[in-house]
Amino acid sequence: MAITLSTDNKLEYRFYPVNGRQIQFRIKAPNDAHIALTTGPNESDPMWEVFIGGWNNSKSVVRKNRTKPDVIEVNTPNILSADELRGFWIRWNDGEITVGMEGEQSSFLSYTDPEPFEITHFGVCTGWGASGEWLIEDATVAAPTPSAPDDQLSSIIWSDVKGGVLPPGAVVGGEDDEPLYIGRANHEGALLPGKVKFSHGVCYVAWGGLEHTKTEYQVLCNCSPMWMPVSGNNIPPNALPAGQTEDGEPLFVGRINHQNTLTLGKVHPSHGCLYIPFGGEEIPFNDYEILIN
């Protein structure tokens, strides 16, 4: 499951193991979101640090081994917000580190280290007058050591939700004052991907111009989600089918930033858009992120 945490104005990293060669996260802070990439569960030598919104939310940098000068620095005025979660990704491969914003394929920070090293952990913190609220995507964090065969764990499962109790391994895909889980429910002969808000005990789906509440639904489990920015009906071949229309057309899971939330919904390829259930309505978007396998 995704990690939600708060960091104080302390400049003290909290460390987690990585899974793969990227991290995806969302942060609400007025300035100075710091991310460390290390060789262990603590500050190390070598290490990289990414400072987003430093210097009173005016610049972002990459620093190596806690040493100045920074290896790259760019002006990023108001890149962070104290009022809303904003999403970012950090990727690394063969010494190249890139940093970008959620929903954008191009990076705003890029550096190639002539002396690459293996990254096993990442840390997050805030400081310089800032505290932060973080949502770290499930795919970022390494899973515990499995006690069952790998092929069983890697299989994707849609689990029935009974009595409002979420099954183990339920997958977080969004945020609306609390994590939103990836769900789906039957409605008018269709199987519709939607959003599950645990405190409400229901799955919300979009259909026929309206938002519908479903008390019987399924939640996606046993999956490390990855998201790809797309437009219209440009569905990638590895998009994860999650339902179908009443006419049998496949539907996919999508998400979009909307009114200080990261809201889940259904991608309808023949309509060329994502529909989200929000505020009682079905709202379409042409540019969105889609869940890939």
Image (cartoon, grey):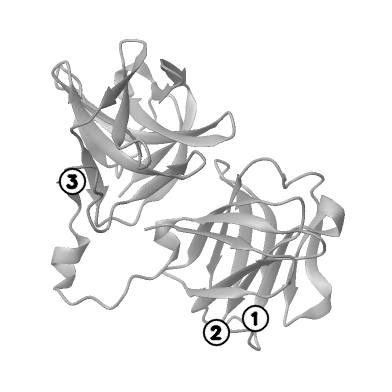
As drawn, the label of residue 157 is none
Q: Say few, some or many: other residues with alpha carbon within 10 Å of mark 2 (under 14 / 14 to 19 / 20 or more).
A: some
Question: In the depicted view, which residue is nearer to us: 60 or 207?
Answer: 207
Residue 31 appears anywhere in the view: yes
Q: Say few, some or many: other residues with alpha carbon within 10 Å of mark 1 (under 14 / 14 to 19 / 20 or more).
A: many
Q: Locate residue 222: give its quadrant.
A: bottom left
User: Distance from label 3 to label 1 (Cα)?
Assistant: 39 Å
Q: Residue furthest top?
A: 208
Which badge, 2 or 3, is on the more N-terminal residue? 2
Do the residues bearing badges 2 and 1 touch, measured as CB atoms within 8 Å?
yes
Relative to 105, is 31 above or below? below
Q: Where is residue 127 in the image (x, y as percent from the top left)?
A: 76, 65
Local SS, label 3: strand
Comparing marks 3 and 1, which lies closer to the viewer? 3
Q: Where is residue 191 in the image (x, y as percent from the top left)?
A: 18, 27
Q: Please tell me which residue is depicted at 55% across the width and 75% down the height of the picture.
A: 15
Residue kind at label 3, given as amino acid type: Trp
Residue kind at label 2, given as amino acid type: Thr
User: Distance from label 2 to label 1 (Cα)?
Assistant: 7 Å
Do the residues bearing badges 2 and 3 touch, measured as CB atoms within 8 Å?
no
Q: Locate residue 126: give its quadrant.
A: bottom right
137 lies left or right of 114: left
Q: Pointer 2: what residue?
A: 39
As drawn, the label of residue 47 is 1
Q: Please tell me which residue is depicted at 29% across the width and 24% down the height of the picture.
A: 213
Q: Pointer 3: what residue?
A: 158
